[in-house]
C-alpha cells in the first residue's frame, strides 16, 4: 500500500521536475512534447500536423520568417489564432532554459 502511494506521488511529482531545475535535453523534449504535431524531423507531416497545417521547419524560407523571440513566445505561451488554441502553452511543462534550447533545436532542423 505504501509503495502504491509512493509511486502515485512520484507520477504526480515528475511532470513538475522541470520547474525544480531538471532540464531534459532538447531532443528528448522535442520527441516527447512536440513531434506529435511538428514531426520528429520538423516537417509537420503527422496526422495532427497536417490537420493543423503546421509549417515545415526544415524549410529555409519558413525559418527565415520566424524570429527567435516569437518562437520562444509560442513555446512558452502557446499559439492562438482567431481566439482558438492552435498550440497549447508549455509554461508548466518546460523550464525557461528548456524552451530556449528548443528554439536552438528547431533552428538546426533547417535543411
Ligand atoms: C497540438 C499540436 C502541437 C504541439 C504538440 C506543438 N505545437 Fe508548435 N505549433 C502548432 C501549431 C498549429 C502552430 C502554428 C502553425 C505553425 O507556425 O506552424 C505551432 C507553431 C509553433 C512555432 C512557431 C511560432 C512562430 O513564430 O511562427 C514554434 C516555434 C513551435 N510551434 C514550437 C513547438 C515546440 C517546441 C513544441 C513542443 C514543446 C510544440 N511546438 C508543440 C502545433 C503544435
Image (tube, grey):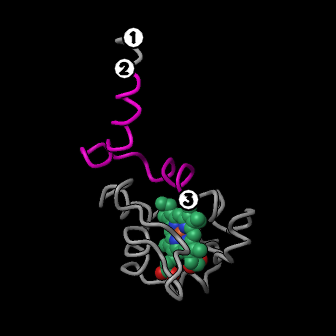
- In the figure, 84 relative to 65: above or below? above
Magenta stretch, main secondary structure class: helix
* Distance (Cα) linking label 3 and label 2: 31 Å
Left or right placement of residue 83 versus residue 23 in this view: right
Query: Mark 2, residues whose alpha carbon is within 10 Å: few (<14), some, or many (≥20)?
Result: few
Secondary structure at badge 1 equals loop
Mark toward the start of the polypeptide (3 vs 2): 2
* Distance (Cα) linking label 1 and label 3: 36 Å
Mark toward the start of the polypeptide (1 vs 3): 1
Which residue carries the number 1 mark? 1
Left or right placement of residue 100 versus residue 79 in this view: left
Query: Which mark lies nearer to you, 3 or 2?
Result: 2
Residue 18: in magenta span: yes
Query: Which image quarter has ligand 1?
Result: bottom right
Residue 17: percent from the left, percent from the top? Answer: 32, 41
Q: Residue at x 44, y 62 (%)?
A: 102
- In the figure, 24 relative to 7: above or below? below
Q: Residue furthest left?
A: 20
Which residue carries the number 2 mark? 5
- In the figure, 64 relative to 73: above or below? below
* Distance (Cα) linking label 2 and label 1: 6 Å
Highlighted range, magenta = 7-33
Query: Which mark lies nearer to you, 1 or 3?
Result: 1
Residue 110: in magenta span: no
Which residue carries the number 3 mark? 34
- In the figure, 24 relative to 88: above or below? above
Q: Is mark 1 within 8 Å of ligand 1?
A: no
* Quarter of the image where one finds residue 14: top left
Secondary structure at badge 3 equals helix
Amino acid at each position: 500500500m505504501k509503495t502504491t502511494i509512493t509511486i502515485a506521488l512520484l507520477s504526480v511529482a515528475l511532470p513538475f521536475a522541470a520547474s525544480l531545475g531538471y532540464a531534459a535535453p532538447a531532443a528528448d523534449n522535442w520527441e516527447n512534447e512536440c513531434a506529435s504535431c511538428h514531426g520528429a524531423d520538423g516537417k509537420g507531416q503527422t496526422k495532427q500536423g497536417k490537420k493543423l497545417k503546421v509549417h515545415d521547419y526544415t524549410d529555409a524560407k519558413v525559418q527565415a520568417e520566424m524570429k527567435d523571440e516569437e518562437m520562444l513566445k509560442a513555446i512558452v505561451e502557446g499559439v492562438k489564432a482567431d481566439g482558438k488554441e492552435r498550440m497549447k502553452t508549455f509554461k508548466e511543462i518546460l523550464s525557461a532554459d528548456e524552451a530556449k534550447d528548443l528554439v536552438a533545436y528547431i533552428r538546426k532542423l533547417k535543411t
